[in-house]
Image (tube, helix red, strand yellow):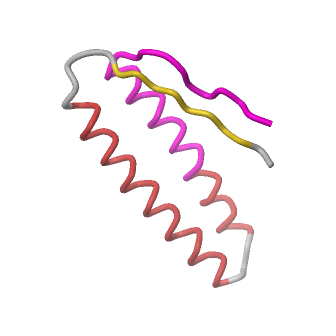
Amino acid sequence: MKIQLLKGSFEPKDLEKIITELIQVKIKYHEEKIKLDGDEESMKMRENRIIKLQNELVEVRNYVSQQTSSIMVDSEISLA
């Protein structure tokens, strides 16, 4: 099953907001799992994933902030 998450042309400011909110939801998910899960190995994995997401968000913001026109996006989620 595939879900079309984003498709089309977005103004840089709008795209930055959408991607920021998507990544923040994922970070919040991992933070909540850390609070509920006492397994140290799982906590470290989630903490590393949060750091990676935060770094990717910085990269996206840097890229988007340099764009002067609309940005084409095609993002899909595949469920298997």
Residue found at x 67% / y 67%:
35
Q: Nearer the viewer, residue 3 or 28?
A: 3
Q: Return the x and y of residue 20 as percentages of the image width and height.
A: 44, 37
Q: Nearer the viewer, residue 53 or 1?
A: 1
Q: Is residue 38 above or below residue 12?
A: below
Tell me if residue 6 is in the magenta stretch. Answer: yes
* Quadrant hosting residue 68: top left
**In this picture, residue 13 sits left or right of residue 27:** left
Quadrant (top left/top right/bottom left/bottom right) for the N terminus: top right
Q: Return the x and y of residue 39 as percentages of the image width and height.
A: 71, 82
Q: Nearer the viewer, residue 75 or 20?
A: 75
Q: Residue furthest bottom?
A: 40
**In this picture, residue 7 sits left or right of residue 42:** left
**In this picture, residue 12 sits left or right of residue 68:** right
Residue found at x 24% / y 40%:
62
Callout count: 0
Q: Is residue 3 above or below residue 55?
A: above
* Quadrant hosting residue 69: top left
Q: Nearer the viewer, residue 26 or 28?
A: 26
Residue found at x 44% / y 61%:
52
Residue found at x 71% / y 41%:
78
Please state the extent of the stretch shown in magenta in the rendering: 1-27
Q: Return the x and y of residue 4 as percentages of the image width and height.
A: 65, 26
Q: Return the x and y of residue 17 as percentages of the image width and height.
A: 42, 28
